Each structure stands twice: as C-alpha cells, then as structure tokens.
Amino acid sequence: MKTLLVLRHAKSSWKQPELADHDRPLNKRGKRSAPLMGALLDEQGIVPDLIVSSTARRALDTARSVAEAAGYEGDIEARRELYHAEPQDYLEALADVTDAFDRVMVVGHNPGMEMLVSHLAGHYERFPTAALAHLVLAIDAWHEAPGVTPAAARLEGLWRPRDLE
C-alpha cells in the first residue's frame, strides 16, 4: 500500500496583473494557510517521504512553506508537467517515484487536484486552495499508479484551511 497526499496550492495573489500566471506568488491568506497545513501533517503523523510539486511559483511556495512547518527535510521535486495537470498526469508522475518512498505528496492546481481526489476516492470532494487529502492507494509500487482505477483508494482524511482556522 502506498500513501498519497494531495495538496492544492495555497491562495495566490492577483495584485500584479503583469505577471504570467505561472509566476504569481501567494497572497496573505495563502502565506497563513500553507504552514497551517504543514503543522497538520506533523500532528497527524503523515509527513511525506517525498514532495513533488508543479513548477508554478504559488505551488512551490506552498510546498516549501508546508515542508518547513511539517519538519520535512527532503527535497522538493519540481515538475513542469504538473502545471495545470490532469489527474492522469499526476498518476504518471508518480510512476517515476522510487518505491523507497511510501508516502508522497503532490502539490498542484485545480481543477486537476479536485478531479484526482474525486477519481481516487470514488466520489466528489470540494477542493479549495490549500486543501489536503490523505489517500491510501491499493498499490504496492508507484509504477502501478497510472493504472489505478476509479474509487481504488481509501480517503483517510480531507482538510480545508477554513475548517482548521
């Protein structure tokens, strides 16, 4: 069994309209909620073994803030193909992960994140910014991830920052 943590990037800023979408930073709310989710990972005892993130600034900033608050000491793997990715893109990215990592967190964007969680859990889940889902996949190796069928995961937890504040 492999554990997947799905984290949508925290709230981003629209104050600089000249910035490309890929380069938008977190806003004040995002900077508050990201460490909150990292502390939750630590409290729940589910700090990831590996973090894989979209290359978008808001996703990487979220990943770094969550990692610091959780006490995560590993690398953050930035992957361009996760920028506005579809659910299958996340599953295919997981296929590249070594099986030495049992718990992996992916950080990305909606609608892909919401669709991924809904696909794996087998039912719709609202997934606002900085939402975190904890899923247990019925696979023994990450290379099996792209073939995961709908409702093939057990949703262990789903947290939204607004519920924790």
Image (spheres, rainbow, N blue to C red):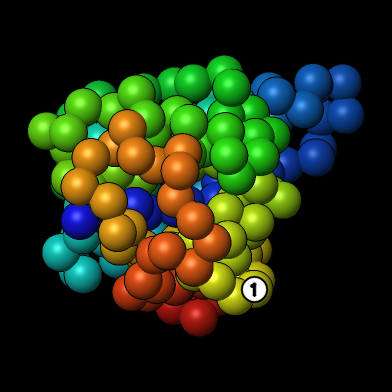
Mark 1 = which residue?
124
Determine the secondary structure under disc 1: loop
Q: Would you identify the image quadrant in which residue 68 lies?
A: top left
Q: Quadrant of the N terminus?
A: bottom left
- In this rendering, the answer to whether 91 lies above or below 66 is above
Q: Residue at x 60, y 75 (%)?
A: 123
Nearest the camera: 143 or 64?
143
Q: Position of residue 163 (x, y in %)?
A: 50, 81
Q: Which residue, as the protein is rendered here, is positioned at the far bottom? A: 163
Q: Position of residue 116 (x, y in %)?
A: 57, 54
On the picture, is 60 further left or further right than 3? right
On the picture, is 115 further left or further right than 145? right
- In this rendering, the answer to whether 55 lies above or below 142 is above
Q: Would you identify the image quadrant in which residue 128 lies?
A: bottom right
Q: How many marks?
A: 1
Is residue 67 visible to us here? no
Q: Residue at x 59, y 22 (%)?
A: 81
- In this rendering, the answer to whether 143 lies above or below 118 is above
Nearest the camera: 130 or 65?
130
Q: Which residue, as the protein is rendered here, is positioned at the far left? A: 100
Nearest the camera: 26 or 84?
84
Dot 1: few (<14), some (14–19), or many (≥20) neighbours within 10 Å?
few
Is residue 21 visible to us here? yes
- In this rendering, the answer to whether 30 lies above or below 24 is below
Q: Amino acid at mark 1?
A: Tyr
Q: Position of residue 157 (x, y in %)?
A: 37, 74
Q: Residue at x 60, y 44 (%)?
A: 87
Q: Residue at x 34, y 39 (%)?
A: 144
